[in-house]
Image: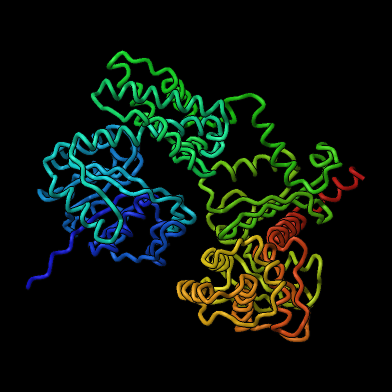
């Protein structure tokens, strides 16, 4: 008997929706090709696959990963799914024209009213399907999606009922793996699109303009009243389009929205991050259809115009005084000495160190004596490109920065500092400022473990790194603790109450997750699980070379949040291993000291003159 031919699916756009669909179609046995323009994201996907966490959990690898739609021509696709923002679609459609065939079915897996017309305008309504997506997530890393919710069913339909068989096949394929998807006829599809868009329009613009999370918006009586009125405007317009909703539709909408988490909707994130938005296909479409039927849509119009006015503009520059206020907030949060006047820091030399770690970016400013005066931290994978710029702008506005140094994971792609140095040298310099002489430095970071051996002159004599596997690192701890349902903030204190000595047999994150679940099913106490995880990390460190008979110090973000790990390491090596103060900032501090040294070599006369004047 001839085997059933594999369905060939191409997915354009690897945001949360695209990644989740790619994984699900692969799980369903399809031949999946994926495409995105982000080279770094594609590199991570090729190396480690797509990883789904939280509401969906899986790690899936793909053979066909492309940076161009044209490169997918050889795959002879049955379906090409667009999971892009609406403003990215026209360019992708033009490229997709080059791989069009008679059998190719185009699919819009996007939000908004009429967004599928961006595809059907080129390929025709008879070749175009539309999906209504009822799942969501956010990017925790370039190839990692934290799936925030899955609310089945999803829907798919042919927009003119010419490809109902193709729509049914798509639904059946996803249903075969329990990812419930219903096929709709064209009229039901339009109604579903309006329902979803009214929900999106009710919160997205409001949250973006007001800088409110969904939970914050739904917790305030005043904003709830606005939300209800936005929904009612959408209903009034939809009814003029012959779309009828149930009498309790508003109540159901409000119940659904109250379940929204403490995070921003996608459109709000784009607006806050000064990126283009899809407002024209959300509130803007309600306004457009309202004008068609002479229905007032005052609130939808107001939010549409506000979002448009703010889009592609630096919001800070639009309102006098706001930038100064943000600068003050950033500086006040990171300033270590609150009693000095702002004038003092503008009159004394400062030096900036930035550690661009895999998980977090750390900023440290030191004065001319090497004393830290400012510390600040940001998530490295924060999509808000302005967050980094705002911190840097605030630092340069508040301090007389003479020289700066970048280090860490992203230093080679960072052009905002005077020099760059390796994190090995910065770690050695940072620790040496407090603990000079020969020593071992254990640095447990987000993605790797390093052991650094410095000589009596505080120079790096040797260093060792773990293998490419992230076992034992911060990311490992985060994933394993989540699987064990242990609050990572409480993990260290839990372990301190255990004397259990069992360890994980596997250092592989995937297998370790399975092993952790066995511990949970066996009824092991959380404090014993926590200690067992730390023991496993200590054993990972023990496989690396630690020089005997010299002091050993512990640095990095892991020890900052898991101080009990120093106790486990001390037990393992039978010697005292202490974390340094502020261990997460030591490398950034070392970068600042190297910036000072580099500047001092080249500007000794200026330094002497300025310091003598200030004294």
The image position of residue 26, as x and y in percent, is 28, 62
User: On the rendered structure, is 231 left or right of 339?
Assistant: left
Write the residue at 32% across / 22% down.
237
Q: Residue furthest right?
A: 615
User: On the rendered structure, is 321 left or right of 346?
Assistant: left
Residue 228 appears in which quarter of the rendering? top left
Colour scheme used in the picture? Answer: rainbow
Write the residue at 77% across / 83% down.
575
User: Can the viewer see residue 66 in this picture?
Assistant: no
Residue 393 appears in which quarter of the rendering? top right
The image position of residue 590, as x and y in percent, is 72, 61
Write the residue at 78% across / 79% down.
576
User: Can the viewer see residue 60 in this picture?
Assistant: yes
Q: Residue furthest front?
A: 247
Q: How many marks?
A: 0
The image position of residue 78, as x and y in percent, is 17, 54
Q: Residue furthest left?
A: 1
The image position of residue 66, as x and y in percent, is 30, 57
Please identify the quadrant where the N terminus is shown.
bottom left
Please identify the quadrant where the C terminus is shown.
top right
Write the residue at 32% across / 54% down.
21
Residue 73 appears in which quarter of the rendering? bottom left
User: On the rendered structure, is 343 left or right of 47?
Assistant: right
User: On the rendered structure, is 312 left or right of 104?
Assistant: right
Q: Residue furthest top?
A: 294
Above-or-below relation of 509 to 342: below
Seen from the viewer's position, the closer of residues 272 and 245 is 245
């Amino acid at each position: 008997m001839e085997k059933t031919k594999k369905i060939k699916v191409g997915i354009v756009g690897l945001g949360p929706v695209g990644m989740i669909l790619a994984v699900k179609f692969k799980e369903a046995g399809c031949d999946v090709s994926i495409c995105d323009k982000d080279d770094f994201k594609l590199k991570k996907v090729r190396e480690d696959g797509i990883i789904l966490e939280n509401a969906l959990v899986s790690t899936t690898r793909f053979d066909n990963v492309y940076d161009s739609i044209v490169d997918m021509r050889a795959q002879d696709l049955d379906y090409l799914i667009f999971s892009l923002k609406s403003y990215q679609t026209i360019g992708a459609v033009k490229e997709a024209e080059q791989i069009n065939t008679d059998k190719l079915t185009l699919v819009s897996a996007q939000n908004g009213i009429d967004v599928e017309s961006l595809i059907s305008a080129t390929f025709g309504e008879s070749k175009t399907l539309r999906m209504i997506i009822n799942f969501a997530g956010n990017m925790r890393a370039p190839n990692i999606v934290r799936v925030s919710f899955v609310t089945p069913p999803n829907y798919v339909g042919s927009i003119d009922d010419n490809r109902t068989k193709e729509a049914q096949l798509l639904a059946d394929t996803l249903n075969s793996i329990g990812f419930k998807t219903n096929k709709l006829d064209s009229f039901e599809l339009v109604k579903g699109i309006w329902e979803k868009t009214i929900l999106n329009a009710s919160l997205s613009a409001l949250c973006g303009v007001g800088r409110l999370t969904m939970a914050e918006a739904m917790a305030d009586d005043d904003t709830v009243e606005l939300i209800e009125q936005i929904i009612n405007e959408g209903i009034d317009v939809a009814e003029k389009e012959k779309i009828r909703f149930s009498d309790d539709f508003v109540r159901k909408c409000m119940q659904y929205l109250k379940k929204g988490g403490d995070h921003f909707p996608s459109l709000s994130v784009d607006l806050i991050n000064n990126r283009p938005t899809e407002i024209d296909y959300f509130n803007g479409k309600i306004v457009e259809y309202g004008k068609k039927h002479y229905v007032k849509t005052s609130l939808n119009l107001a939010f549409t115009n506000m979002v448009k006015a703010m889009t592609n503009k630096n919001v800070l520059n639009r309102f006098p005084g706001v930038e100064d206020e943000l600068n003050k907030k950033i500086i006040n949060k990171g300033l270590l000495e609150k009693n000095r006047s702002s004038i003092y820091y503008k009159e004394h030399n400062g030096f900036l160190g930035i550690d661009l770690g895999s998980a977090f970016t750390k900023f440290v400013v030191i004065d001319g004596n090497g004393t830290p005066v400012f510390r600040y931290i940001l998530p490295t994978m924060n999509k808000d490109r302005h967050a980094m710029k705002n911190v840097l702008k605030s630092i340069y506005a508040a301090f007389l920065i003479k020289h700066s140094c970048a280090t860490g994971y992203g230093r080679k792609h960072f052009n905002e500092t005077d020099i760059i140095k390796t994190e090995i040298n910065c770690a050695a310099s940072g620790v040496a400022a407090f603990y000079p002489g020969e020593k071992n430095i254990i640095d447990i970071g987000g993605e790797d473990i390093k052991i650094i051996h410095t000589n009596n002159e505080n120079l790096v004599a040797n260093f060792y790194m773990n293998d490419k596997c992230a076992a034992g690192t911060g990311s490992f701890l985060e994933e394993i603790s989540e699987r064990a349902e242990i609050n990572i903030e409480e993990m260290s204190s839990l372990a301190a109450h255990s004397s259990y000595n069992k360890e994980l047999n596997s250092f592989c994150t995937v297998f370790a997750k399975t092993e952790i679940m066995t511990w949970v099913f066996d009824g092991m106490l959380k404090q014993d699980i926590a200690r067992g995880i730390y023991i496993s990390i200590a054993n990972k460190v023990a496989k690396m070379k630690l020089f005997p008979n010299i002091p050993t110090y512990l640095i990095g973000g892991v020890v900052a949040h898991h101080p009990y790990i120093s106790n486990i390491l001390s037990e393992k090596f039978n010697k005292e291993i202490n974390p340094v103060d502020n261990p997460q900032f030591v490398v950034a501090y070392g970068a600042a000291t190297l910036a000072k040294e580099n500047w001092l070599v080249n500007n000794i006369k200026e330094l002497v003159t300025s310091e003598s004047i200030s004294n």
